Amino acid sequence: MDAFEWTAGVYATAMAMAKCMDSKELTRSALIFTQLGTTLATLAALQELDETSTEKNDTDSSAL
């Protein structure tokens, strides 16, 4: 899937959800998905930093 297909899929999902929710449910869902996205991004960044740190330490150790 390319970026355009991902974007279209996300948009279609949002529209389908919005059609069957009142404004309070829609607001609550938006807040939950925003928090979920932020948390996932934080975890992914921490995981990448840990992997990068481990690779660097392995490279530094092999030089000894």
Image (cartoon, rainbow, N blue to C red):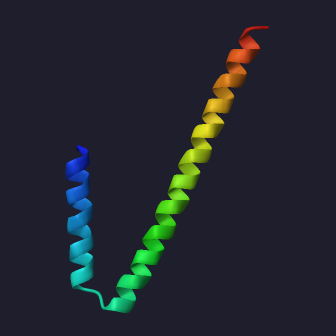
Q: Residue at x 20, y 58 (%)?
A: 8
10 lies left or right of 31: left
Q: Residue at x 21, y 50 (%)?
A: 4
In percent of width and height, residue 60 lies at: 73, 16
Q: Residue at x 43, y 70 (%)?
A: 33
Extreme residue toward the top, this view: 64
Residue 58 is drawn in which quadrant?
A: top right
16 lies left or right of 27: left
Eyeballing the image, is 14 above or below 60? below
Q: Residue at x 25, y 53 (%)?
A: 6
Q: Which quadrant does the N terminus fall into? A: top left
In percent of width and height, residue 51 lies at: 61, 34
In percent of width and height, residue 15 lies at: 22, 74
Eyeballing the image, is 10 above or below 31? above
Q: How many numbered marks are there?
A: 0
46 lies left or right of 17: right
Q: Which quadrant does the C terminus fall into? A: top right
Eyeballing the image, is 55 above or below 10? above
12 lies left or right of 59: left
